[in-house]
Amino acid sequence: MRQYQETLRIETRGTGLQELTDDVARIVRAASIETGMAHIFCRHTSASLLIQENADPDVQRDLVAFFKRLVPDGDPLFVHQSEGPDDMPAHVKSALTQTSLAVPIAGFQMVLGTWQGIYLFEHRRKPHTRQIVVHVLGE
């Protein structure tokens, strides 16, 4: 069993989804693992990871709109606002999604569906630098 790990530094543009599929695929290729698992982990509490459709950008727009309606910024329910009115809503959105993903590897590449892509979901309004750890394990 072999392992390989890299950390991606992603500059976000504020709230929205940013596709990471090509970056993760590059790391999987660099690992030279024929069969195994890629574990993708977001090192933050106000951003998350998703596997979602990558064919129609309206899907990403609609997801952002849905989460904005579900957990609006500035909701008076929340006490925690250390970094502004989008602070606690970002934590809730992260809790409702995922901070890690596992994608199988076969034939030296990720086994994703035809229209599946890996996305970083930035929940904060302002741009941030996010770290995504990609750990590949297998043979």
Image: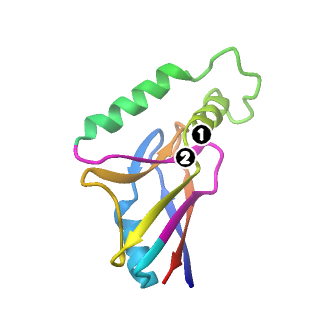
What span is colored magenta in the figure? 37-55
Whether residue 62 sits left or right of residue 136 in the image: it is left
Give the quadrant of residue 41: bottom right
Q: Position of residue 46 (x, y in %)?
A: 61, 42
Whether residue 101 sits left or right of residue 44 in the image: it is left
Question: Which is more toward the observer, 138 or 131?
Answer: 138
> Which element type, helix, strand or loop, lies under badge 1?
helix
Give, as a three-letter code, the residue at label 2: Ser
Question: Which is more toward the observer, 41 or 124?
Answer: 41
Instruction: Look at the image and say whether residue 31 sits in the magenta stretch.
Output: no
Q: Position of residue 10 (x, y in %)?
A: 49, 59
Q: Position of residue 75 (x, y in %)?
A: 63, 17
Instruction: Look at the image and say whether residue 54 sits in the magenta stretch.
Output: yes
Q: CA distance from mark 2 to mark 1?
A: 5 Å
Q: How many other residues sit within 10 Å of disc 1, few (<14), some (14-19) or many (≥20)?
A: many
Q: Quadrant of the N terminus?
A: bottom right
Residue at 48% over, 25% down: 68
Give, as a three-letter code, the residue at label 1: Ser
- Whether tag 2 and tag 1 are in contact, CB under 8 A, the answer is yes
Residue at 42% over, 85% down: 32
Say above or below: 72 vs 113: above
Q: Residue 48: give its label.
A: 2
Instruction: Please name the residue that numbered disc 1 is placed on.
Output: 94
